[in-house]
Amino acid sequence: MEKKIIATTSLAGCFGCHMSVLDIDERILELIELVEFNKSPVDDIKTFTKPVDIGIIEGGCCNSENVEVLRSFRKNCKILISLGECAIMGGLPALRNGIPIEECLNEAYINGPTVGLNTQHILPNDDELPMLLDKVYPCHEIVKIDYYLPGCPPSAELIWDALVALITGSKLDLPYEVIKFD
Ligand code: SF4
């Protein structure tokens, strides 16, 4: 069977979902028989070098760079998966959505109890830095998402079963125990 091409990224995520992918443990040896990784933090490929079959997104969108990367995944991947609660609904980072962005920045860089050295009260303003969005957005509010794998992080069993089903075209029969939302 021809290997499927996979790409992954972490947007406003914590890399915990990627760690859960690695939690498939020794089955990673079976996985690399089935797939070839393209752009992903698990290798050193920074830009897409070929069309991708399955794109896996961890994290929602909290800044302009996240949006750009997510759109490039949609453009380059036939199937896009939101992996984990952050990608699906913003996750814990979306707790900031009820607080004005200016208040968040002032607390982080000026008023917070651990802000010691910023005596000139400067907010980060270099052009190289991506702009924070007004709130944290789930991926499906930016691009079309084809599949959702819930959990914070999703269990390795869920990731494995879902990936194998997608790659081989077999029926996905998920037992209740492998699906969780926490
Ligand atoms: S869903 Fe949970 S584990 Fe995954 S990126 Fe978000 S916080 Fe981390």
Image (tube, rainbow, N blue to C red):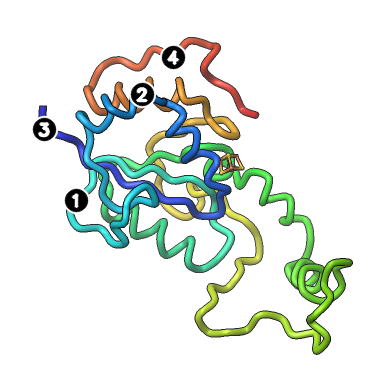
Mark 4 = which residue? 174
Q: Is residue 131 left or right of residue 2?
A: right
Q: How many marks?
A: 4
Q: Report if the CB atoms under discs 2 and 3 are less than 8 Å apart.
A: no
Based on the displayed image, in which of its 4 quarters is residue 159 positioned? top left
- 10 sits to left or right of 151: left
Residue 96 drawn at (x, y percent)? 73, 56
Label 2: few (<14), some or many (≥20) within 10 Å? few
Foreground: disc 3 or disc 4: 3
Q: Earlier in the sequence, mark 2 or mark 1?
A: 2
Q: CA distance from mark 2 to mark 4?
A: 21 Å
Residue 17, how many percent across, how many down?
A: 51, 39
In 3D space, how far apart are the residues under numbered discs 1 and 3 (Cα atoms)?
A: 14 Å
Q: Secondary structure at mark 2?
A: helix
Q: Are marks 1 and 3 in contact (CB under 8 Å)?
A: no
**Which residue has dot 3 on it?**
2
Residue type beneath disc 3: Glu
The quadrant of the rendered image in which ligand 1 is seen is top right
Q: Foreground residue, 67 or 115?
A: 115
> Mark 3 touching mark 4, by CB under 8 A?
no
Nearer the N terminus, badge 4 or badge 1? 1
**Residue at x 46%, y 29% (from the top left corner):** 23
Q: Secondary structure at mark 1?
A: loop
Tell me the SS state at disc 3.
loop
Q: Confirm or deny contact between disc 4 and disc 1 (CB under 8 A).
A: no
| Three-letter amino acid code at the position of disc 4 | Leu
Residue at 30% x, 21% y is: 165
Q: Which mark is residue 26?
A: 2
Q: State the separation of the CA atoms marked 4 and 1.
A: 29 Å
Cα distance between the residues tagged 2 and 3: 21 Å
Mark closer to the observer (2, 3): 2
Report which residue position mark 1 lands on. Answer: 51
